[in-house]
Image (cartoon, helix red, strand yellow):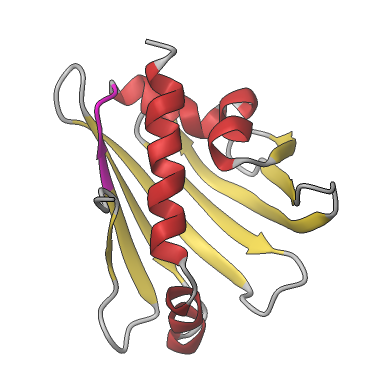
């Protein structure tokens, strides 16, 4: 399967740039990141809290097939500009990865196409490299494929 989501992670840096173009208007792509019902579907998680505003916070809970909580993700939203950008922290509780800073930018390419650019900054190069050693790229690509398919149904 083609990796439509691209990850640029320069050696020796504690950041990565994730980009993906979608066959969606920018308004629908942005909606996929701020509507709890849509997030739950494409991320496969339960949205416990989502305050889409400056200094708002969020909490997601992901469980396995038996209902056991696999992880809880939390964060604070620092900047929120509809259809343009979200700046937030992201932390998976009870993991060694720590807090990361995410700059999400939503760009209109045409009336029916848009681009997501995620600039993710980690506390250290070692933490970033631990994430990259996981099947991270495949997971992000699969999630973005689900996002495209689910939001296509909203058109």
Residue 127 at x, y = what percent? 51, 82
* 88 sits to left or right of 58: left
Residue at image coords 71%, 36%: 47
Front one among 61 and 14: 61
Tell me which residue sits at (85%, 53%) in the image.
68
Q: Is residue 23 magenta?
A: yes
Observer-nearest residue: 39 or 12?
A: 39
Magenta span: chief secondary structure: strand
Give coordinates of residue 3: x percent, y percent. Answer: 27, 53
Residue 80 in view (yes/no): yes
Q: Seen in the image, is 10 located left or right of residue 56?
A: left
Q: How many marks?
A: 0
Looking at the image, which residue sits at the far top?
155
Vertical comparison of 100 with 70: above or below: below
Q: Is residue 117 positioned above or below 145 on the image?
A: below
Quick one: 116 or 41, which is closer to the camera?
A: 41
State the residue at coordinates (40%, 27%).
Answer: 149
Q: Is residue 140 magenta?
A: no
Residue stretch rendered in magenta on the structure: 20-24
| Position above or below: 46 against 71 | above
Residue 50, relative to residue 151: is it above or below?
A: below
The answer to whether any part of residue 103 appears in the image is: no
Residue 144 position, x and y percent, is 40, 42
Using the rendered view, name the quadrant where residue 69 is placed. Answer: bottom right
Horizontal and vertical percent for residue 113? 20, 26
Outermost residue toward the left in this view? 110
Q: Quadrant of the C terminus?
A: top left
| 136 with respect to 109 (left or right) | right
Of 10 and 65, nearer the camera is 65
* Residue under the point 15% across and 30% down: 109
Q: Is residue 13 left or right of residue 92?
A: left
């Amino acid at each position: 399967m083609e990796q439509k989501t691209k990850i640029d992670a320069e050696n020796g840096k504690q950041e990565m740039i994730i980009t993906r173009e979608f066959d969606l208007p920018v308004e629908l792509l942005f909606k996929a990141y701020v509507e709890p019902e849509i997030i739950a579907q494409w991320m496969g998680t339960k949205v416990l809290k989502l305050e889409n505003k400056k200094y708002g916070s969020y909490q997601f809970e992901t469980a396995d097939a038996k209902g056991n909580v696999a992880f809880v993700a939390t964060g604070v939203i620092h900047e929120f500009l509809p259809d343009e950008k979200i700046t937030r922290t992201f932390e998976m509780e009870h993991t060694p990865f720590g807090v990361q800073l995410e700059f999400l930018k939503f760009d209109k390419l045409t009336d029916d196409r848009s681009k997501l650019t995620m600039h993710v900054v980690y506390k250290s190069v070692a933490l970033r490299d631990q994430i990259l050693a996981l099947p991270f790229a495949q997971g992000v690509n699969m999630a973005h494929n689900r996002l495209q398919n689910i939001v296509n149904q909203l058109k």
